Amino acid sequence: MSTIYFDESIILLDVEAKTREDVLHVMGGNLAKKGLVKMSFIDAIIARETEFATGLPTTGVSVAIPHTDVEHVNQKTISVAVLKDTVEFGVMGDPDETTPVKIVFMLAMDQAHDQLALLQRLMKVFQNAAALNYLANEKSKTNIKNLLAEKLDFALEGGE
């Protein structure tokens, strides 16, 4: 997998949102403002989340991994949001069920095969309850960035 853009500016803490659409607007809007995704990304990610839920009821802290098609992406990136309060997301593979999500990993991949590789790496993080609990409670964006860079083992591009 080639270099992924990941820095503190796309890690959002204490995000206030009432619905999953609110979360996706905030995160997608931040990526669009930075020029990492096209403006079409926000509508595309909301539409995809409606059709294919991405909530995962992991041990201790539920997560969601919204993503959409590569044509909406300018630069490969992953944004992370820790929500102030949990927000209900549909459960992956069972859209009639919901799970109270605390951490959202928004994927913006510019090649389809990279998305699968990143999802496989993320699953290892999701299976680590201690890592998820740390992410849910950590207040330093730098510490979050460093933990994920280590756990996901990818080449990073970005500053701050």
Image (cartoon, grey):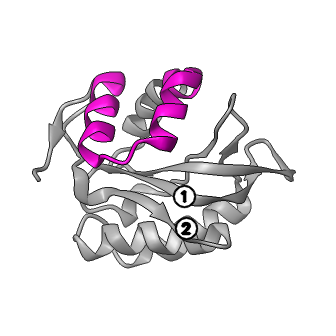
Residue type, mark 1 in image = Leu
Answer whether residue 146 is magenta in the image: yes
Q: Which of 52 and 13 is in front in this view?
A: 13
Q: Is residue 142 left or right of residue 24?
A: left
Q: On screen, 91 above or below 19?
A: above
Q: Position of residue 108 (x, y in %)?
A: 38, 53
Q: Residues within 10 Å of mark 1 (few under 14, many from 20)?
A: many
Residue drawn at point x = 21 percent, y = 49 percent? 7
Residues at badges 2 and 1 in contact (C-beta under 8 Å)?
yes
Image quadrant occupied by the N terminus: top left
Q: Where is residue 131 in the image (x, y as percent from the top left)?
A: 48, 26
> In the image, which is nearer the foreground, mark 2 or mark 1?
1
Q: Looking at the picture, which amino acid does disc 2 mark?
A: Val
Which SS type dominates the magenta stretch?
helix
> Residue visible at 71% across and 53% down?
53
Residue in the picture at 32% in, 29% down: 147
Mark 2 vs 1, N-terminal side: 2
**Residue 111 figure quarter:** top left
User: x, y percentage for residue 135?
Assistant: 45, 38
Is 118 in front, or is 69?
118
> Which numbered dot is residue 129?
none
Residue behind mark 2:
23
Left or right: where does residue 42 sit relative to residue 50? left
Q: Give the range drawn in magenta.
A: 124-153
Query: Residue beneath label 1, please?
Result: 83
Q: Distance between the residues labelled 2 and 1?
A: 8 Å
